[in-house]
Amino acid sequence: MIRSLSLRLRHGYAAPRAWLSLLLIVMLAGCASQAPGPDQARERGDWDAQAERLQALDDWSLAGKVGLRTSKNSESANIDWQQRPDTYRILISGPFGAGRTLLKGVPGKVTLTNSEGRFEAGTPEALMEQQLGWSLPISALDYWIRGLPAPNASERLEHDELGFPQRLQQLGWTIEYRDWSRADDLWLPRRLVMSYGDLRATLVVNQWDAVSDS
């Protein structure tokens, strides 16, 4: 995975509406579990106790809602993300003009399919650069979505009173962890907000399925 990433925005460039779904899925590169409720009874020490298992977690899935807000647009959609050790599949569906957008990744290739066609690149970052003219720190999201900083990049991490991540600043982004849920004996983010300048993405996870070594 790419460890050191950058975001290169071309000033004055407005992404077409059809590509907002691409922006959402690459920002975010377990339906079997019971849907988590509001923040349950976390306790001090819970986060440290699961640290090794969380770091090793590379087989998981989630379903939820994702919203994106920029200075020009505000959109929302459903997200279904399946992450495996060497592959991933992200499906975005909802009130976008494109309807359904599917992103599949295998080693060395990323494929995106929507109503506009089928597109390929070597990495999610390259796909964004190819189609939008700028790129996002996609590969870091596999860590951020688990409540972890991406490796090999400086970060500033703040914890809440129970020792859980509350605010992470890394690669120019600010990630705020607003709520947590319990899934397969792991505490995982239920609601998080990511921002970069006037770009703001909110993810609410309704279902987590985490397969980890006990």
Image: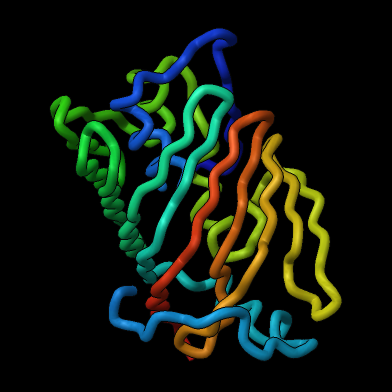
Residue 125 in the image, given as x and y percentages of width and height: 43, 31
Residue at 43 percent across and 15 percent down: it is 133
Residue at the spot x=33%, y=27% of the render? Answer: 19
Whether 204 is drawn above or below 97: the answer is below
**Viewer-side residue, 99 vs 50:** 99
Judge from the rendering whether residue 146 lies leftward or rightward of residue 93; answer left or right.
Answer: right
Q: Residue furthest right?
A: 161
Q: Residue at x 38, y 36 (%)?
A: 124
- Residue 199 lies in quadrant: top right
Residue 95 pos. (x, y %) = 28, 42
**175 on left or right of 145:** right
Q: Is residue 8 placed above or below 101 in the rendered structure? A: above
The colour scheme applied to this rendered structure is rainbow
Q: Is residue 50 above or below residue 87?
A: below
Question: Residue 80's spot in the image, x, y percent?
Answer: 31, 59
Residue 201 seen from this side: yes
What is the total number of numbered labels drawn onto the structure image?
Answer: 0
The answer to which image quadrant residue 159 occupies is: bottom right
Residue nearer the viewer, 167 or 108: 167
Q: Is residue 106 visible?
A: no
Closer-to-camera residue (108/144)? 144
Name the foreground residue: 176 vs 149: 176
Which residue shows up at 55% across the image and 12% down it? 10
Percent coordinates x, y for residue 146 in the rendering: 56, 65
